[in-house]
Amino acid sequence: DEVIFSGIQPTGVPHLGNYLGALRQWVKLQNESSPDTILLFSIVDLHAITAKQDPKQLAIWRKAMLASLLAVGLDPKRCIIFAQSSVKQHAELMWILSCSASMGYLSRMTQWKARIIDRMMQNWSADILQSKLALPENASPLQHTANKDAVKLGLFSYPVLQAADILLYNTTHVPVGEDQAQHLEFSRDLAIGFNHLYASENSTPLLVVPQTLLSPAKRVMSLSSPTKKMSKSDPSPKSRILITDSNETIHSKLRMAITDSIEGVSYDRGKRPGVSNLVDLIYHFDESAAASPEELAADMKDLSLKALKERAAYKINLGLREIRSQYGELMSGDQKQLIERAEDGAKRAEEIAEATMKRVRNAIGMGL
Ligand code: TYM
């Protein structure tokens, strides 16, 4: 049977990258999957603290993320929605897996390196960089990141926790954006290695090896530097559109979006990253308008870039209107009900996770 699992960090309200790259796909899978398919979506708060978080803010964002997941259309009657930290088996399996994960493989993974380098490229002032990386005062960020002293163990082993998330639930499919592809490859390799070490020959597979499901909008780009992905951690709020942004905010962020000085509209992600990103956004919010982004760009070739931005803002607002109002209602409504829903999800998740852990504990010699 199919099991679909995915996660999102509660480090802000989801942006268009999260929405088009992941959340919208989750809702589609929910609506189109057979009733036997198990769907789990986790608010991965243990991952969130691999970057420095303000505890009060994190508490708010955990709730805001739950409201966001419900607002985009996930149905807690159909899916198991829960906070990662409330199912302790994640941490337990992570430890066990980390005893067979190689340092060499982890240090070759690009994402944690990219995170640090990103911060530096964005020209953050030394003190912001220092606080984000939780560096000691007076430390030179460059020097410290260069010799890796400042990199926390949790950030380094981030992919092992992500593998544990997935493998706990016998996941067959993981719907994510492209930036997660390398982490999923690692999860697969870890599962195969672990099975090889511990699975007895005639038993059913110890850990199920998961497949990656990339969404059609696999990489949404930043509005202010369109050669980089849209990201929650970009210091510039105008680089991203949140799923809760008002119509005015959407329009004003799009008016400021970086494009180029070539006249008219055409599609070329390499040569015209800003313009192509806007075409992509229109396409993904209105897939019936054209067969492909290329075709859509050809239809719009005579539009001015100002008009292209207007059209993008219009389509995005139309696509987000309902989500925004749902989110507003959930956040201003009965908070107790939100929390009860989350606890209910955690109980159902824990049942599946515990069954996997029994198998794993037995296999490694820690069964009763
Ligand atoms: P996170 O919280 O950064 O992002 C959540 C989802 O949004 C997708 N995404 C994007 N897709 C397209 N374009 C973008 N600009 C863009 N930005 C983000 C991500 O690919 C992701 O699907 N490590 C994960 C969370 C995680 C997880 C897991 C995911 C933890 N455990 C297990 C899957 C399975 C992360 O930081 O996602």
Image (spheres, rainbow, N blue to C red):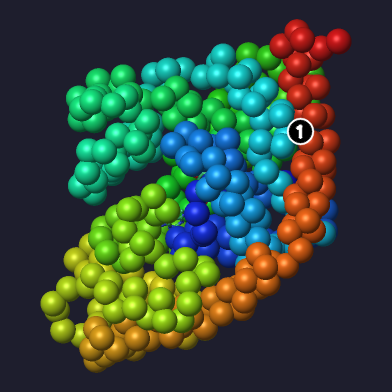
The vertical placement of 255 against 126, above or below, is below
Vertical comparison of 328 with 184: above or below: below
Residue at the top extreme, as displayed: 365
Toward the bottom, the furthest residue is 302
Q: Secondary structure at mark 1?
A: helix
Residue 7 visible somewhere in the drawing:
no
Q: Residue at the location (25% across, 20% down)?
A: 147
Quadrant of the image occupied by residue 151 = top left
Q: Residue furthest left?
A: 261
**104 lies left or right of 257:** right
Give the residue displayed 41% in from the left and 81% down from the top: 248
Q: Which residue is mark 1?
A: 353
- 204 vs 291, left or right, is right
Along the line of sight, which residue is nearer the eye, 205 or 69? 69
Percent of width and height locating residue 250: 41, 76
Q: Quadrant of residue 353?
A: top right
Task: Tell me, yes or no, if residue 87 can be seen here.
Answer: yes
- Mark 1 burial class by Cα count in 10 Å: few <14, some 14-19, many 20+: many
Where does residue 49 sit, x and y in percent of width and height?
51, 36
